[in-house]
Amino acid sequence: MFTGLIEEIGRIQRIEAYGGGSRITIAADEVLRDLKVGDSVAINGICLTVVARTETAFQVEAVAETLQRSTLGTLQRGDAVNLERALQASSRLGGHFVQGHVDGIGEVISLTMKDPGYWLEIRLAEELHPFVVEKGSIAIDGVSLTIAQVETDRIAIALIPHSAQATTLSSKKSGDKVNIECDIIAKYVGRYLGLRKKETNISDELLRQWGY
């Protein structure tokens, strides 16, 4: 479990084929302070397990499923990545609960200056739209953010300068792909309501008639 508050930006040192997946070496500083083999680290919002570490870097392994369902498979040597160690029970809970389980891949539409920060627009897959609401939480490449606007095929985020500068989001450009994790509460509520609608035959039209 994570919070979506990025601790530092790491750099990809090496990517090696490993079975059907990859072994990835990441140079870091802050997250290495107490990192041990077996610990979980979120890399661009993807929860992975540390399999080895040195004084300046750590290694993780990603299976083919993870590479296909996230942007991890497109990373190259030298790329910057957002890093966060797993949440400790004694820590303050800023951000929101982030599992490190990617729900889909979004596409950056634009990143523009909007004083004092930035306005980030991202196109979402249709199946993710039921789980996003204005003022709700979302994790983009592992960064906990608040949704400022929801449109038919996109969402917008008002980025404060710190969130832009302390993560890789400030370097995003049109067409870039990003990992999306929707709020876990929204997913459970959506699942529950879907089951209830099937059981009771309550339709969207009927809910509108009742004033919902």
Image (cartoon, helix red, strand yellow):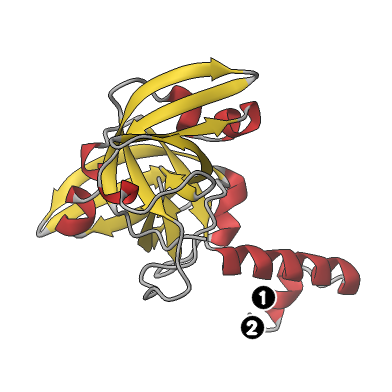
Examine the rendered structure and indicate whether residue 62 appears above or below residue 124. Answer: above
- The residue shown at (86%, 66%) is 198
Q: Counting other residues with Cα less than 10 Å from the Cα at mark 1, is it few (<14), some (14-19), or many (20 or more)?
A: few
- The residue shown at (32%, 56%) is 157
Q: Secondary structure at mark 2?
A: loop
- The residue shown at (70%, 83%) is 210
Q: What x and y, as percent, mark residue 121?
A: 33, 47
- The residue shown at (53%, 43%) is 49
Q: Secondary structure at mark 1?
A: helix
Q: Which residue is mark 1?
A: 208
| Marks 1 & 2, CB-CB < 8 Å contact | yes
Q: Which residue is mark 2?
A: 211
| Side of 6 where 126 appears, left or right | right
Q: Counting other residues with Cα less than 10 Å from the Cα at mark 2, is it few (<14), some (14-19), or many (20 or more)?
A: few
Task: Pick the residue in front: 38 or 40.
Answer: 38
Task: Pick the residue in front: 104 or 203.
Answer: 104
Q: What x and y, as percent, mark residue 153?
A: 48, 46
Query: Residue 126: which numbered mark, if any?
Result: none
Task: Pick the residue in front: 10 or 169.
Answer: 10
Quadrant into which the C terminus falls: bottom right
Q: What x and y, as percent, mark residue 146?
A: 36, 64
Say which amino acid is labelled 1: Arg
Q: What x and y, as percent, mark residue 54?
A: 35, 34
Say which amino acid is labelled 2: Gly
